[in-house]
Image (cartoon, rainbow, N blue to C red):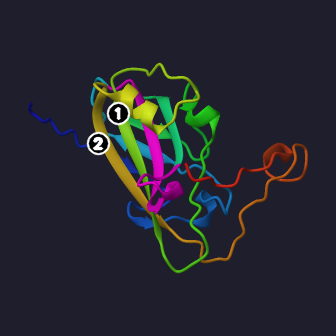
Amino acid sequence: MRWKLVPMLVESKAFEDGGIVPLKYSFYGANTLPDFKLSNLPETTQTVAIILHDLDVAAAYNPEDNLHWLAWNIPATVPVTQIEEGKLPEGSVNGRNGRPYMGMGAPNGPRYHHYVFEFYALNAKLDLPITAGRAELLEAMKGKVVAKAAYVGRFRNDTNAVPPRRRRPGSAGGPGGASQPRPAAQ
């Protein structure tokens, strides 16, 4: 089998690739999805999928790292797709029961965690239930990936910020009075 490498490029105004992620994009801050510009997408690209995970955590005593967020069926425009800060384009699907973006959540301490955004350019729309997780997404993407790129951010909570607490619906908290969920190892 011959490999054809497609040099998809990922850029963000939020932080440089390999750089320090500002608190705003973390679970301790505003939990805002960073903007991303994906360029040099192959002509056959129809949608994009994203997986965000923390390489420095083995969840629940297993070898898998900590999955923070995944989304698919992000509509693509060729050769450049822009994902605006704070929101995905209409038609995008958040996996794991519609769980929205969950930013960096490394605990207070001197050590940086490495958060990887994996971007997959796909030549099809995926037919997955909203309940799908990483394993189901990876399986559904087989034979459809036309380009892939990664973007890494380093984060540590050196501000002693405290994660939001779970609140009952209607109590003061995040947008519309809704509470923000605590990060969970999955």
Q: Position of residue 69 (x, y in %)?
A: 54, 45
As displayed, is residue 162 above or below residue 86? below
**Alpha-carbon neighbours of circle 1 within 10 Å: few (<14), some, or many (≥20)?**
many
Does residue 142 appear in this view? Answer: yes
- Find numbered disc 1 in the image and state the secondary structure of the residue it sits on: strand
Q: Position of residue 183 (x, y in %)?
A: 64, 55
Which one is in front in this view, the residue at disc 1 or the one at disc 2?
1
- Given residues 103 and 96, the one toward you in this image is 96
Using the numbered discs, state the Cα–Cα distance from disc 1 to disc 2 in whole angstroms.
9 Å
- Given residues 61 and 161, the one toward you in this image is 61
Name which residue lies at 59% across and 61% down.
105
As displayed, is residue 156 above or below residue 5? below
**Amino acid beneath label 2:** Met
What secondary structure predominates along the stretch shown in magenta? strand
- The answer to whether residue 89 is left or right of residue 134 is right
- The answer to whether residue 60 is left or right of residue 160 is left
* Residue, disc 1: 121
Please provide the residue range marked out in magenta: 45-67
**Alpha-carbon neighbours of circle 2 within 10 Å: few (<14), some, or many (≥20)?**
many
- The answer to whether residue 171 is left or right of residue 108 is right
Q: Is label 1 in contact with label 2 (beta carbons under 8 Å)?
A: yes
**Amino acid beneath label 1:** Ala
Query: Nearer the N terminus, badge 1 or badge 2?
Result: 2
Q: Position of residue 174 (x, y in %)?
A: 79, 51
Name which residue lies at 43% across and 20% down.
125
Name which residue lies at 48% across and 48% down.
52
In the picture as drawn, the residue positioned furthest to the front comes out as: 61
- Find numbered disc 2 in the image and state the secondary structure of the residue it sits on: loop
As displayed, is residue 146 above or below residue 117? above
Q: Position of residue 116 (x, y in %)?
A: 42, 54
Total number of numbered discs in the rendering: 2
* Residue, disc 2: 8
